Amino acid sequence: MASAVPAGPCDAGWRGPDRTGHTVGALPFDEASIGGGPVVRARRVRSMVLSVVGCAAAVGCVPAVPSPSLPPPEPPLVDRPWPMHTIAGQFRGANGLGPGDVDGDGDVDYVTNYEFDQRYVLSINPGLGSDAQRQGWQQVQVWPPGGGAPPQGRGVNPENSVLGDVDGDGNLDVVGAQGESLLEFWEGNSPGIRVIFGPGGSDSLDPTKWVDAGRVPATTTFGHLHWVTTRDLNGDGIDDIVAGGRLSDTTNDYSGIVWLEAPSDPAVRRDLSRWQLHSIDPGQFSGHGFVYDDVDADGDVDLVDANADFDTPASEESVYWYENPGANSPALRSPWVKHEMYRGPEFHTKPQIGVGDLDGNGLTDYVTAVEHEVLVFLKTSVTPVRFELLRVPKDPAAEFLTRPVRIVDVDGDGRLDIVGMLTHKGSVLPQSKASVFWMEYTGDRPTESNWTTHVIRWGSGKTALIPEFGEKWDNVDIRDVDGDGDADIVANCEEWWMQQPLEVLPYPDPDVDPSTVAVVWFENVEGEDAPVSRQLGDLVTIEAERPARIDDGQWVSRSVYPGASGDGYLQAHNAIGPLFDETLPPSNRTQGHISANVFPGVHHTIDVTGGTYQLRIRRWAPRNWGYSLGSAASDSVWLSIDGQPAVALDDRGGPYDQWVWKQLDTPIHLGPGTHDLTLSVRDRGYAIDQIELRAATSPS
C-alpha cells in the first residue's frame, strides 16, 4: 500500500502521543450543550458580508476617522530568520497541506485545497538538488471549479485535504473535507468528504487522469467538516478515512469526529456508498487538528484533539484524548471513551498539537499553544495515563494568536524543540512578532522557565483590507526538504494575497488572478554562515533573494515575473497602500510613500576591496498592485549602507511590468572589508532581482 507520508522528522522515530492535559486521570464525559453557538456564527457571517461590502466601498476612499497607528516594530532579535521559498502562489485560501509521494519518484509532494478559489491542487517536488526547489514547484489541478462530479461549475468550500491510498491500488488519492457556507458566492457550499482517485506514477501529472468520485453519501447531510486524515483504524490493512468538523451553520448539527470504514472487498472500494460512517465523538464542538498516538501504550492508535473553534463556548474549550477500544472490539464502531486532559478559555480557533518525547523519559509528550503561553503536557505514566502540565510563558515576540505547533529537533543537537506559527488579528500580524518561531530548553529537562525563543520569520503587518484576512499559518509539515540533513518547514498560509481590483473578487469572476503567499518552505539555516556577496574584479553582484537576513516579513521570495536571475526575486508583497494602513504613522497615510526607518529591512552583506562604487538595482515596478498602489506608487525602495541615513532609490516612474536597471545618482565610498547593505520598504509591490556595485576607483 502506498505511503501517504514518507518518513520525516515528525514521523517515524519522532512522533509521540498527540496531546494531553494536566489532570491526573480521566474526567467523566458530559455532552456539551450548544450554548450560544448559532448567534456567534450568525454574527460572523454578518461581519463577513459587511466586510466584503465595505471592502468594495473603500477603494479610493479615505476613512472618515483615522485609525490609531500601532507602535513601531521592536528592535529585531539577533537570530537570523530563515529564507522562505515559494512552493505555490497562484490561488487564494490555501487551507490544507497533505504530504505524500504522488508520482513515485521518492520525493514528498503536497496536496492543497484552496477554499476561496475552489480547487484541489498538487505541488510536485522537483527533487533534491534541483534549483527549482527554491523557484516554485509544478502545480497540477486535480479538481478545478466546473470539473468532476456535480455540482459542476460551483464552489464546494474545500476546508482540508490529505493524500492516502483509499482504494488499495497502490496509488495515492486525494481526500478532501468540505464544508457548508452561507456565503456560497465566495466559499462555495458542498459539505462532505470528497474523494479523487489518483492514477499513480507519471500519470499523476496529468489532471485528466484523476477520477473525481464525488462525495461520500454518508457525509453530505450533517455538519461542517474541516479536517480529514487517512488511517487504518480497524487493523485490516486498509486506509480508512477519519474526519472532524464543527457545528453546522444551517442545521445546528454537530460534525464531531467520525471515521469512515473502508469496504473489505477491494472491488467495491471506489463505490463511496459502501463506506460506513461511525462516530468517535458526536458531540465535539471542533474536530479540527486531531492527531494520532498510542496515548496509553496498549498497542493501538488513539486520538488527541484540542476542542476550540470560533463558535465553541469558552466553557467548552478543552483538550481530550480518545481511547481506541481496539481493532477487534465492537465498541470501535461506537463513540470512544473520552478523557479530558485540560479545560480553559484561553484558546483561539483551531489550536493544534505537537507530539514528541520532550523530556526523554521514553513517554510521548504533547504541546499546544494559546496567545500568551505554550502548554506542555509531560507524560509521567501510562497505567493510568497521567501528565505534568507546564505553562510556559511565551517570549514577547511570540505572544500572539497561535495555530500550528510541532515538536522536532530544530538545531540538530539531539534534543527535541518546539516550533510554533502565528495568525493575524484583524488582518494585522505585527512586524514585531515572530510569525514563525522555535523554542529550546536548557538544563536536563523542560520546566516552565528554562526556554529560549528564536525567530524563523517576522510578521508581515497589515496584508488585507478586511479584518477577516491576513497572514494566517494554517498547517505545517516538518522534514528535510533540501536533503542537507536538518529539519526544514513546509507550511500553508491561508489568507495572504493580492487581487485586483478587490481582494474578495468571487472565484467565478474571470478577472481572478491573484498573487498569493500560499504554500512555502522555510530553509533551516541554524548554525550556517549567512551569505556574503564578494567583489570579483571590479564588480559585486548581489542576488536579492539571498540576503544575509530578513527583518521585515513583508518581503517575499518569488519567481513569477519572467527573466529573473538566480532563484527568483524579492517583492514587498503587501497589497495595502499607505492610505488604508492604520498601522502606519499618520503622516505616512497621506504622503503616498512609507518613510525611512518605519520598517526594518532586508540585509545583504558585501565584502569589497574598497574605493568608490556605482550602485544600480534591477527592479520590477508593477503597473497595478493592490489598493492605491502600482505604477508610481510602487516604484521605489529605501537604501541604507552601514546604518547611515537611507536614501530613496528609483522613484522615477516607469517603465512598468518589466525588469529594468535603475542607478543611484551618487557614487558611494566604501572602505575595504565587509559592509551591510539594507533595503527597506518605501513602496509596496516593488520587486528586486539583483543589486550591483561596480568599482569606479580603487582605494588610494
Image: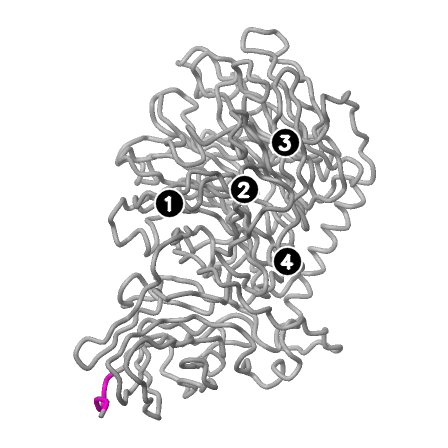
Residue at image location 59% in from the left, 86% down from the top: 591
SS for dot 1: strand
Q: Which residue is mark 2?
A: 443
Q: Which mark is residue 123?
A: 1
Do callouts 2 and 3 mark residues in contact (Cβ within 8 Å)? no
Residue at image location 72% in from the left, 28% down from the top: 23
**Distance of label 2 from label 3 (alpha carbons):** 30 Å
Residue at image location 30% in from the left, 44% down from the top: 483
**Amino acid type, residue under disc 1 in the picture:** Ser
Q: Is residue 612 left or right of residue 434?
A: left
SS for dot 4: helix
Earlier in the chain: of badge 1 and badge 4, it is 1
Q: Nearer the viewer, residue 53 or 308?
A: 308
Q: Quadrant of residue 254?
A: top right
Earlier in the chain: of badge 2 and badge 1, it is 1
Earlier in the chain: of badge 4 and badge 3, it is 3
Q: Which residue is mark 3?
A: 305
Q: Which residue is mark 4?
A: 396
State which quarter of the image contains the N terminus.
top left
Earlier in the chain: of badge 2 and badge 4, it is 4
Report the label total. 4
Q: Residues within 10 Å of mark 3 (few under 14, many from 20)?
A: many
Q: Nearer the viewer, mark 2 or mark 3?
A: 2
SS for dot 2: loop
Q: Nearer the viewer, mark 2 or mark 1?
A: 2
**Distance of label 2 from label 1 (alpha carbons):** 41 Å
Q: Nearer the viewer, mark 4 or mark 3?
A: 4
Q: Which residues are magenta?
A: 694-699
Looking at the image, can residue 360 be seen?
A: yes
**Distance of label 2 from label 4 (alpha carbons):** 22 Å
Do callouts 2 and 1 mark residues in contact (Cβ within 8 Å)? no
